[in-house]
Image (cartoon, rainbow, N blue to C red):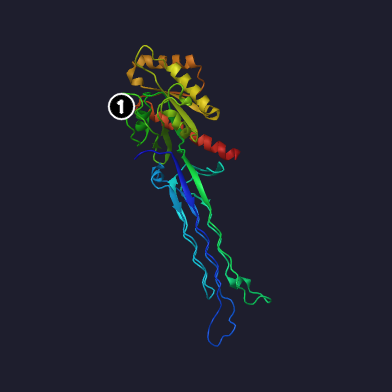
Amino acid sequence: MRFVDEALIKVQAGNGGNGCVSFRREKYIPLGGPDGGDGGDGGSVYLRADPNLNTLVDLRHARSFAAERGQNGSGRNRTGAKGRDKVIAVPVGTLVQNTDTDELIGDLTRAHQRLLVARGGYHGLGNARFKSSTNRAPRQATPGTAGESRTLALELKVLADAGLLGMPNAGKSTLIRAMSCARPKVADYPFTTLYPHLGVVRVGAQQGFVMADIPGLIKDAAKGAGLGVRFLKHLARTRLLLHVVDIAPLGPDADPARDITDIAAELEGFSPQLARRERWLVCNKIDLLAPEERTARCEELVQQLRWRGPVFAVSAATAEGIEALKQHIMDFLHKDEHAAQTTG
């Protein structure tokens, strides 16, 4: 399925039904009095977070949505039926903005969460409402009010506990395949990942977390170069960044330390807050090095970068070091969650 993370839709809530002007007319009951009923409320428009969706592609084809209007009131004090609400399914992690006012209406971060985006019109009042001791035969009724109409900009930011970032061909797609059930495309050329992938990583029988893989970044990504800049926003919700680097690159100009520095600069240019997120270094493709070279190569890279965070040496191709990395991530997420609960 095509991945779409932005959509523009128009929503129209239903108008309220009009009140009725009516008088009771029955044999042997003179001066029956007013019996016009109220109209029904108009239906509202809601967005609902559907955990089974992971793209906004459906909203690229159907862009206008309307709820039902309320029915008009009728005689014998009969109230019009309420218009049915319109519920639009969107992926979990969808941001909703009113394009007319630039107001952020809401953020759907929980499965099955509902968000009111256009309120239905209020019902009109029938003439029975206006009866009084001084006005026993009112002939006025009120119309229903109009339902709200809005143009909404929807933006999807995927929800993940850990996110992978790195240069093209660093092995991110192979790594998420080795750690989860996700099956992104893997090939020996750059930019095989064209859109984000999510995978559920299982740690033991009862534990797990969600990992996201975005397209590879290159220098000047924050200025629009390459594919990754469009998807950097999907890392904004992650609690942990895994910076994947090819520890055994080919070619005389290859420089893992420079690649890491360039991407760190792109993170800072895109979002200083994202650049300060907890970030671990994952040295991938150690299977291409002799066993006696692996530790020395990783230590050399750490010294060049003056890296102070955790460092992991893994091989996504052979799964070496993968289980240890998964367990450390799980432990970090538990500690982070506990700290958030304590401070909250």
Which residue matches tag 1? 187
Q: Residues within 10 Å of mark 1 (few under 14, many from 20)?
A: few
The residue sitting at 39% across, 40% down in the picture is 205
Split into 4 quadrants, where in the image is the C terminus? Answer: top right
Hey, which residue is sitting farthest left in the picture? 187
User: Horizontal and vertical percent for residue 59?
Assistant: 41, 45
Q: 119 or 109: which is nearer to us?
A: 119
User: Horizontal and vertical percent for residue 169?
Assistant: 36, 24
Split into 4 quadrants, where in the image is the N terminus? Answer: top left
Q: 64 or 54: which is nearer to us?
A: 64
Amino acid on which disc 1 is placed: Ala
Residue 187 shows in the view: yes
Q: 13 or 94: which is nearer to us?
A: 13
Hey, which residue is sitting farthest front in the picture? 139
The residue sitting at 38% across, 24% down in the picture is 168
The residue sitting at 44% across, 49% down in the picture is 64
Q: Secondary structure at mark 1?
A: loop
Hey, which residue is sitting farthest bottom in the picture? 28
User: Horizontal and vertical percent for residue 248?
Assistant: 36, 17
Q: Going by the image, does 327 lie left or right of 104? A: left
Q: Is residue 309 above or below residue 61?
A: above
Hey, which residue is sitting farthest top in the picture? 252
Q: Going by the image, does 306 lie left or right of 195? A: right
Q: 73 or 3: which is nearer to us?
A: 73
Counting every numbered tag in the picture gives: 1
User: Horizontal and vertical percent for residue 302?
Assistant: 47, 17
Q: Is residue 25 above or below residue 237?
A: below
Residue 330 shows in the view: no
Q: Is residue 7 above or below residue 213?
A: below
